[in-house]
Image (spheres, helix red, strand yellow):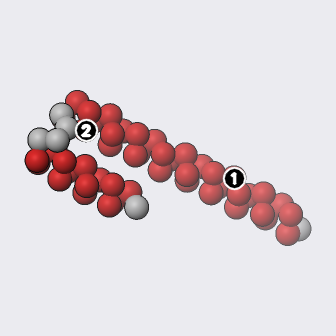
Amino acid sequence: MREDMRNDHINRLRKGDCSVDTGVHFITLLSNFERMGDYCLNIATGINRIHKK
């Protein structure tokens, strides 16, 4: 999904539908959301391991 969003964004930049500054913020948000998702997955995995013991 991240790659699709990134590619769609690049297409918007090429068409001039958004500015470079907005693009930087968008890509930063995508990266932060992905990092948060990774943290959530790590927490869920850890909790799952605790409950299996």
Q: Residue at x 60, y 49 (%)?
A: 39
Tell me: 24 left or right of 16.
right
Tell me: 6 left or right of 48.
left
Q: Which residue is mark 2?
A: 23
How many marks are shown on the rendered structure? 2
Q: Residue at x 32, y 61 (%)?
A: 4
In the image, residue 24 sits, relative to residue 13, either above or below, namely above
Residue 48 or 14: which is nearer the viewer? 14
In the image, residue 12 sits, relative to residue 46, either above or below, namely above
Q: Locate the C terminus by quadrant.
A: bottom right
> How many other residues sit within 10 Å of disc 1, few (<14), some (14-19) or many (≥20)?
few
Q: Residue furthest right?
A: 53
Residue 47 x, y percent position in the rendering = 78, 57
Q: Residue furthest top?
A: 21
Q: Residue at x 48, y 45 (%)?
A: 33
Residue 10 x, y percent position in the rendering = 20, 50
Whichever of labels 2 and 1 marks the residue nearer the N terminus, that label is 2
Query: Which quadrant holds residue 51?
Result: bottom right
Q: Amino acid at mark 1?
A: Ile
Residue 17 x, y percent position in the rendering = 17, 41
The secondary element bearing badge 2 is classed as: helix
Q: Nearer the viewer, mark 2 or mark 1?
A: 2
Residue 18 x, y percent position in the rendering = 19, 38
Q: Amino acid at mark 2?
A: Gly
What label does residue 43 carry, if any? 1
Distance from the alpha carbon under mark 2 to that under mark 1:
30 Å
Q: Locate the N terminus by quadrant.
A: bottom left
Residue 32 or 9: which is nearer the viewer? 9
